[in-house]
Image (cartoon, grey):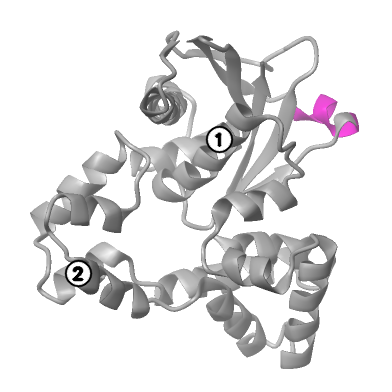
Amino acid sequence: MFSQYFGQYLLNRGIVAGEVLLKALEAQQQSHVKLGVLAVGAGLLTAAQVEEIHREQTRQDKKFGEIAMEKGYLTQAQLEELLASQKQGHLQLGQALIDAGALTFEQLEKALQDYQKEYSFSDKEFASVQEGNVELLLARTLQLDPGEEYLNSYIYLFARNLVRFVDPHAWLEPVDGGSKDRLAGAWSVEQQIEGEFALKTGITGSEQGFCKLASAFAGEKIEAMGELGQASVAEFLNLHNGIFLVNMSNLGMELKLQPPVVKEGALGWQGDHRAFKVNFPGGQFALLLQG
């Protein structure tokens, strides 16, 4: 996940252009083989077992390898061998940008050093982030408050579920208070979480952004926010929130969900709330949280 956040840094600093970054991310994706494909290719899993694990990921917040081991499909040694065969994404991204002539090796090295310095990562922390410490990465780049434990857990999970269910190159970025008024979208979905604590959750975006989200989640092209488009974006938020409730239940906290509500227009929330822009190749929308 580090690669898209580092890519966002390069884009925001004007080091690379958006079109160049998108092509580099696509090139990285083509060379990044998922664990399920690697496992089938190695004869360790069947296609049916891979699909079973993917379905399980829609019910609980666990990595592919974790579930495969729990089901007895892979041993620890087999999983480690498969993981070792995957390349580090940010190195692939850097190589793709160098190959495109967008960066030199020296510029890439300096950008990594500047990124580490800007977000105050120690050498050990920076290595951890590059190796997949999502919580530390998001805590720094999204400027999360360490005291907001449940809200942060929600955001960490949302970032992971974006990658799992929408696009492997999706990323979040914070929205400051002065920019929240510009998040009014043509379509919105909101869903209330209730119980031992309350959290109002919502996503909003343009019709084009929501169509892209609906298409990515449904796995088919959706060009207008008709019945299928509305159902898809609502189910995305509902699926994510359902997994969040499972996580909270595992911690001994029982919560419940109200049905998601889709509407044309902005969310129109009053009072303080957190907002994040959600970016993925070809689309954008916003996540809003209040509680």
Image point (58%, 49%), residue name: 135
Residue 19: horizontal and vertical position, in percent?
A: 67, 66
Relative side of 77 to 44, left or right: right
Residue 48: horizontal and vertical position, in percent?
A: 9, 53
Structural crowding at the residue carrying mark 2, measured as other residues with C-alpha within 10 Å and reported as few (<14), some (14–19) or many (≥20): many
Under mark 1, the amino acid is: Ser
* Foreground disc of the pair 1, 2: 1
Residue 239, compared with residue 83, is above or below; it is: above
Toward which corner of the image does residue 144 lie, by quadrant? top right
**Residue with the mark numbered 1:** 153
Residue 30, compared with residue 148, is above or below; it is: below
- The segment highlighted magenta reads 178-183
Residue 286: horizontal and vertical position, in percent?
A: 66, 33
Under mark 2, the amino acid is: Ala
Circles 1, 2 touching at the beta carbon (< 8 Å): no
Q: Look at the numbered disc 1 and give the secondary structure of its residue.
A: helix
Image point (43%, 31%), residue name: 240
Give me the disc on residue 39.
2
Image point (63%, 80%), residue name: 94
Residue 179 lies within the magenta run: yes
Relative side of 216 to 156, left or right: left
Image point (41%, 31%), residue name: 247
Structural crowding at the residue carrying mark 1, measured as other residues with C-alpha within 10 Å and reported as few (<14), some (14–19) or many (≥20): some
Camera sees residue 217: yes
Camera sees residue 170: no
Q: Look at the numbered disc 2 and give the secondary structure of its residue.
A: helix
Which of disc 2 and disc 1 is earlier in sequence?
Answer: 2
